[in-house]
Image: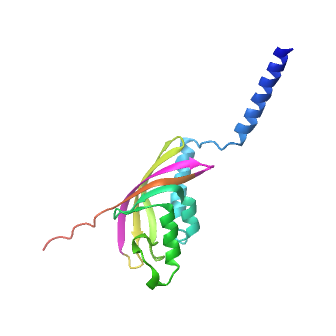
Amino acid sequence: MSRRVFCIALFASFVLSQQVMGHMPRTPSPEQTRVEVAELLKDFLAPGKNDKLETHERFWAEDLVYTTSGGIVKTKTDIRKSFAESALPAASKTNPAISPPPATTTYSAEDVLVRPYGEIAALTFRLVAKEASGEMTTYRNSATFIYRDGKWQAITWQATKVPAPEKPKQ
């Protein structure tokens, strides 16, 4: 009798574990990871989206460490604060180092490389920032994404400004 109860209990626990596992988000395949992270980046940089708090809320993880090209370390809280400050009149903005860029700047990503490592993905790319005046600035960016709660988010970000080409000496 006890053997029969044991077998029934074992079978029941197996069935329950399969039901629970079926509802847990699974880590995407390496190819899915490449596509999803690249699409997330493209969407993040899209005109009309990058200057929106909602876009940043989706893109950055709560435990983000972002190092700007100027060496300033920011958190997701700092990014949120910059959006709140940008809504204030210009005279009351106290920290231009963390203010979002003007909406006239457009961004594109080139040489995008996503390297999947299970629930982690490494991203490297060249960011091109183009001002309304036509002036362009280029950065090399590196990031680490983590897959949590069924979505990819950046947990680290490092931006390095590429020096402008030297002008010929006369």
Magenta segment includes 141: yes
Q: Where's residue 7, x and y in %?
A: 80, 19
Q: Where's residue 145, x and y in %?
A: 50, 50
Residue at x 54%, y 54% (from the top left corner): 153
Is residue 50 at least partly visible in the picture?
Answer: no
Of 64 and 36, nearer the camera is: 64
Q: Where's residue 52, x and y in %?
A: 55, 70
Q: Is residue 42 above or below residue 89?
A: above
Q: What is the magenta range?
A: 135-151
Residue at x 43%, y 56% (from the top left corner): 157
Of 101 and 126, nearer the camera is: 101
Of 50 and 39, nearer the camera is: 50
Magenta segment includes 96: no
Task: Please tell me in which quadrant of the rendered image residue 132 appears.
Answer: bottom left
Task: Please tell me in which quadrant of the rendered image residue 9 appears.
Answer: top right
Q: Which quadrant does the C terminus fall into? A: bottom left
Of 4 and 56, nearer the camera is: 4
Describe residue 9's horizontal placement relative to residue 21 as left or right. right
